[in-house]
Amino acid sequence: MAFIGSLDQGTSSTRFIVFDETGSIVGQHQLEHRQILPQAGWVEHDASEIWQRTQEVIKGALANAGILANQLAGIGITNQRETTVIWDKEDGRPLSNAIVWQDTRTQEFLSSLSEDVKSKVTYKTGLAIAPYFSGSKMNWLLKNVPAVTEAVASNRALVGTIDSWLVWNLTGGVHVTDVTNASRTLLMDLETLDWDDELLKIFEVPRSILPKIASSSEIYGKTLASGPLGAEVPIAGILGDQQAAMVGQACFERGESKTTYGTGNFALLNTGEEIVRSKNGLLTTVCFKFGSEKARYALEGSVAVTGSAIQWLRDQLGIIKNAPEVEELAKSVTDNGGVYFVPAFSGLFAPYWRNDARGVVVGLTRAATKAHLARAALEAICYQTRDVLDAMSADSGVKLPEMRVDGGITANELCMQMQSDIMQIDVVRPKVIETTALGAAYAAGLATGFFKDKSQLRANWQEGRRWKANPGSSLAKSGLDNWKRAIERTLDWIK
């Protein structure tokens, strides 16, 4: 049992990574899946395709590592959090495409809720009233998909976030989620850590179709020997992707934080055993719960579009052929040429929470080029992150001494230097940047005894790269002022 596995199911791809006891990668495999966009504001995934990709990447990673599944002490699962799938427990078939966290189709339903109801939901869950979260997605599926209505009536339907879907398939029928994913549904009470009857009534979701809520680190079941691992391996960790990155960055104590750069951007600050309710547009969420230990909570700021803005430059505009190209293109000019890009494709998330906002490019002149737009896209990632971290400091009273960062975009040296200049603090990337997958592996390793305790995990963390701010950078002064003016231009677009 020399290794621990991690299944990382993200918004654009699925991967399986094998780690050793030092937290180093010994093998991995990754595959993308389709983004299904039926109409404006709708974003879907085919849950069957995700399950197929899951099986392929598990086999591929084991082959890449040159090991057998029976050499794994266990596997952890981390996932895109709010994305919702509903399936038939009799034949395992999804009853509809999964509705992705970026989807905004439920805005009308949420707007119809009274102010009293909205306040009650926000207080109990710590979340904003936004289409982002799973509760309204479940409500939409229950009301608008005849196959779902029929399956619920005949007691065949099960619903969950992607972690539940994967565990159910891997184990042959265990229906479970963890507290971090459940805390993103608008259906779980932060204090009781259980589904709340009043919230279930508001969203009209029957308790019978929901998974059991468990801790983030325990043995939930074993994989089927007939499944992709070809052996019975304990599934022993589940964490939503952003909470997994907190664990992977060893942010176990109050006041510790990290920022993950992925399809969207997510900054979390550990608030310990205290539930801190935000006054500045942030979310309150469960950070992690290891076995029988008390839950730890976090403040979170989420930005909907960061890495996906680079995908937009590639796929919709065609100004780059692959994501890494954006750095060289942006470096070919010395500044943004006065161009600012706010990628509010599905509204603005924290700290604004404006569903009426839409993306804008402002400051265009005849001299503007695709290089200026590429640079503006990278700056947008950094300015949105600054907005969130400013709100976090205001809520917590904690001034960040430095930023711990992870995720794909941290490989972009220019972007990280911009982030340091805009924040005017050091930006630090760990040696292992796959912290989301690592966090799920850590959770599974603690539950199976592969890792002794959190101090061993903390000792594994090593600095990989540090960026220092240029004092007095114009990005942090006039650039930030112009960014705020650009934000104003996005508002009130959707009536």
Image (cartoon, helix red, strand yellow):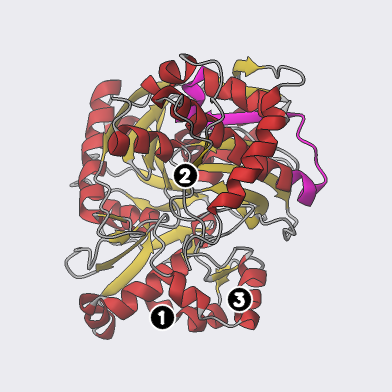
> Which mark is on residue 321?
none
The residue lying toward the viewer, choosing from 339 and 13, is 339
> Which mark is on residue 118?
3
The residue lying toward the viewer, choosing from 15 and 233, is 15
Q: Residues within 10 Å of mark 1 (few under 14, many from 20)?
A: some
The residue lying toward the viewer, choosing from 175 and 95, is 95
Q: What element carries label 2?
A: loop
The span picked out in magenta is: 392-413
Q: Is residue 398 magenta?
A: yes
Mark 1 or 3, which is nearer the eye?
Answer: 3
On screen, residue 283 versus residue 342, left or right, reads: right
**Quarter where residue 324 is shown:** top left
**Quarter where residue 457 is shown:** top right
Give the mark nearest the N terminus, 1 or 2: 1
Mark 3 or 2, which is nearer the eye?
Answer: 2
Give the Cα separation between the discs numbered 1 and 3: 20 Å
